[in-house]
Amino acid sequence: MNYTIHDIQKLIPHRYPFLLVDKVLQCEDDHIVAIKNVTINEPFFTGHFPEMPIMPGVLIIEAMAQASGILFISKFQDGKKRLVYFAGIDNAKFRKQVGPGDQLRLELQTVRMRQTSYKMHGTAYVNDEIVAEADLLLVAEVIES
């Protein structure tokens, strides 16, 4: 299954300037592939760094977490609204810089899934080159019935 930005906004509460997933190319039982288009008008570029704009690594990880949240929330069709929280990170590595004009492809694979928590391994690519990877722990809570 794939999702447009409108579908994504129905699943997760993030909005500009903190919505870091533009579309989902694939969302299956245990993995997701999502896209973040990195543009020069991103608000973080004004300060990171004005002469050499670089996307902060923590925002690449946040984009992975948001994609993971989309995968997790899309699994439930019980009518309950859920909110996913980022609970932990292990083995984060940043291999290349990401800047304006790049397109991040976020690929996340489920390592372990339980009723309210899950662990994902994520890899971020630009032009088929790995730019970052990490293991993410996320938890979900029902906020409405």
Image: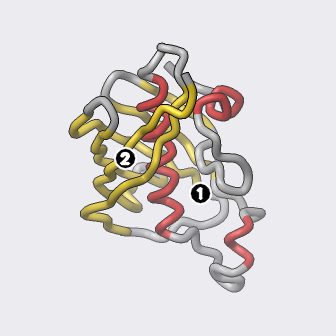
Image: 96 above or below 111: below
Q: Nearer the viewer, residue 145 or 127?
A: 145
Mark 2 — residue? 138
Q: Which mark is residue 121?
A: none
What x and y, as percent, mark residue 126? 48, 54
Quadrant placement of the C terminus:
top right
Residue 5 lies in what quarter of the image?
A: top right
Image: 2 above or below 17: above
Of the residues tagged 2 and 1, which is closer to the observer?
Answer: 2
Mark 1 — residue? 102
Residue at image position (41%, 33%) is 32
Tell whether 53 sits left or right of 67: right
What x and y, as percent, mark residue 84? 47, 42
- Binning the other alpha carbons within 10 Å of mark 2 as few (below 14), some (14 to 19) or many (20 upward) gives many
Sequence order check: which comes first, mark 2 or mark 1? 1
Three-letter residue code for mark 2: Leu
Tell whether 83 sits left or right of 52: left
Q: How many numbered marks have been drawn onto this rendered protein structure?
A: 2
Residue at image position (44%, 37%) is 141
Question: Which residue of the protein is positioned furthest toward the right in this rendering?
Answer: 41
What x and y, as percent, mark residue 78? 48, 14
Assign a secondary structure to mark 1.
loop
- Binning the other alpha carbons within 10 Å of mark 1 as few (below 14), some (14 to 19) or many (20 upward) gives some
Image: 61 above or below 108: below
